[in-house]
Image (cartoon, coloured by chain):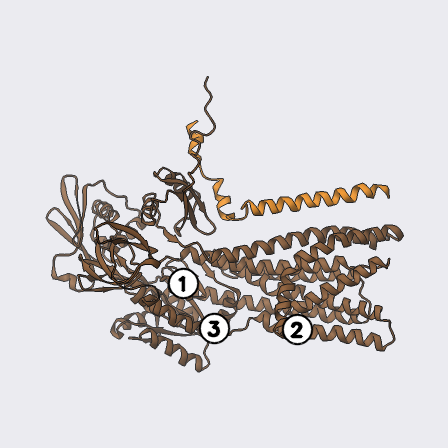
Chain colours: A brown, B orange
Amino acid sequence: MATQPLLIEAPASPPEKAIRSLFVAPGMRCASCMGKIETGLVKVPGIYSARVNMTAKQIAILHDPALLPPDLKAAIAAVGFDAEPLVEAGLEAGAAENRALLRALAVAGFAAMNIMLLSVSIWSGAAGATRELFHWLSALIALPTIAYSGRPFFTSAWAALRHGRTNMDVPISIGVLLTTAMSLYETVTGGAHAWFDGAVMLLFFLLAGRTLDGVMRGKAREGVAALLRQTAPGALVMEADGQSHWTPAADLRPGMMMMVAAGERLAADGVVRSGDSSVDIAFLTGESAPVPVQPGSPVQAGALNVQSAVTVEVTAVGADTVIAEIARLMEDAAQAKSRYVRIAERAARLYAPAVHLTAALAFAGWLIAGAGVHQALLIAVAVLLITCPCALGLAVPAAQIVACGALMRRGVLVKDGSALERLAEVSEVVFDKTGTLTLGRPVPENLDKLDDADKGVVLALAQASRHPLSNALRQALEGQGVRAANLSEVREAPGEGMTARFAGEAVALGRPRGVVSLFGLASEYRRGGSATLLGFADALRPDAAEVTGQLRAMGIKRLIASGDRSDALVDIARQVDVTAIGQLRPQDKLALIGRLSAAGEKILMVGDGLNDGPALAAGHASMAPASASDASQLAADAVFLGDRLAPVPVAIRAARRTIRVVRQNFALAIGYNLLAVPLAIMGHVTPLIAAIAMSGSSLIVVGNALRLRSAAR
Amino acid sequence: MTGLTFLIPIALLLGLIGLGAFFWALRAGQFEDADGAAMRILIEDEDDRAN
């Protein structure tokens, strides 16, 4: 009879001291991932709640302060996801701005609908006291709306005017304020017309354009942040008394001893003091093979310790680290790019003075022709209103947001609209080799040497280790649909590999014993007395040759610029049929890009390593694969996901189509103005016609932009 | 015409309620994770199965 309670275990309310941590887990894709993480994490003692945000690929965890970032990371790994801690900053400012715009848009939309309702009854013949009442009601709704929703434009216009410049917001602000003042005057004096509807509608359409623009930037920002892997937020520091404490990266000082476990990233530059291990510094060199380190070896912040625990004495922190030095080089290179003027701004520069001039001329013309100040002012306002760039304001963001949405579905995250514009102008593509033309990670070459039972054993052994070669084996075998065998006594010996027992027989996966290992990457699988050598190589991306062919067909030049030895490049250069230049340091790549740009080429740099960072920042446009180092993803205009290189030509084609649609949109918007402005100057435009024409042109522009939905096919 | 004295305030009130609902939704975070919300419907709730 007892009825079950609805909630079996009511979530215990978290104690006061609980803190919130953010993690990014780019691997989350489906509903069951969310379920697994959310239900799995709360079972861990000390975690009170976990909430997944799928759009940003983030997990927000409410937990006991005693749990440190590495513990939480391990807990997420235990449910089967790779996650990295995220510092909560930067994203919030943009999101708050977008929310404010959305609120202003909602208010303007609400007011525009209600005022339109009142205006329709006036146009259909309301007169006398009714009309006056309706005008007063309209004013009542419109004045607070304009004060609230108009703020983004007023502040921007004021800022421009204060610096003696003008922008698109200046005519908008003047138009809206003048219209409102005139309408108020008409209302008070009982005149026949008021234009509150026009002013509010104008704000509504302009805000729609601006909100779209903001949403697009926010989306791309979130996407890139989700892919960003942080360099370690801190380290376990050994104190003089033998105790160890978690210390945030900002508090690390030279001379401190960091204890770095296998699988952790370093938070500062340093020198190994005890322990033998190898570190993955692919972020610095682009090389996938881990570099062995022993006491005395220097190691860099951001390096991934792959084998066993080491103690590292800190030598440089924060801005003094190698990684920070390269970041500075990148910042300097990015300066040039910030001088690029967006197409909308170029249009505004021509358009804004023309609008002022036309309205002023109309006013002066009618005065000279003998009209009263009142009538001349009315016509000037009508001209300002009708030239106000509703459709122009929507022309660019509408096209760009649709194109970026289409690209995002193809796995390309474009950071902002200007990136699309620059991508469209590209005339030469410079590729990095490792990690860009190639996958940048070892791929097993001769798995077919193993039979099915052995594959299962190898998979089970590889799953138990975090070594990069084990990861490569796991990915390749899981991709073939192999199921892991049941092993017992699984053990990992640092530097040696994995050992276990399978059906009573000793099995092992580890460093090869023979001399053969001198040639390239390899690991050895041993079962009983027999041993199989598994070779690895960095494989070319599956469609690299096809992509370079497509680029040639599009009339774009190609070049490979690599830090690798020239003889390592020959093979790849031949396969993709592209000229290659080798042995380039980051500065050399930067200089190469400078030379090509000076020769008039618009360079698209495609690279992944931190050594490509400065070149990425210096290129006219840049793209990086999602496997790239953080710094490269930050520097790149677009990030593409997956093992294929096809997103590069796809993005260029989509960008070119977007620019075409943007130009069409400009033509439509300006064509509408060319038609309507003479009518307005002659005094023939009634508010009804102005409103219909305004919304009509905006809708046409948005409709034209929607054609870009298929741009990324 | 006297109908207007009721109808206009009612129309404005209904509109304001809609606007208020939107603001509430915005503040309550309903638009924070549009992709996740679409997927959450597919999560099988283990608590339900246990019943």
- Which chain does tag 1 point to? A
Q: Amino acid at mark 3?
A: Lys
| Label 2 to label 3: alpha-carbon separation | 24 Å
Q: Residue at x 84, y 68 (%)?
A: A374
Q: Residue at x 71, y 67 (%)?
A: A174
Identify which residue, A475 or A127, lies in the foreground.
Answer: A127
| Label 3 to label 1: alpha-carbon separation | 16 Å
- The image quadrant of residue A191 is bottom right
Sort mark 3 into few (<14), some (14-19) or many (20+) by Cα contacts within 10 Å.
some
Tell me if residue A421 can be seen.
yes
- Check the image and report above or below for A536 versus A485: below
Sort mark 1 into few (<14), some (14-19) or many (20+) by Cα contacts within 10 Å.
many
Percent position of residue A179, x then y:
76, 63
Label of residue A633 in the image? 1
- Check the image and report above or below for A402 versus A29: below
Percent position of residue A54, x then y:
46, 48
Which residue corresponds to mark 2? Answer: A351
Sort mark 2 into few (<14), some (14-19) or many (20+) by Cα contacts within 10 Å.
many
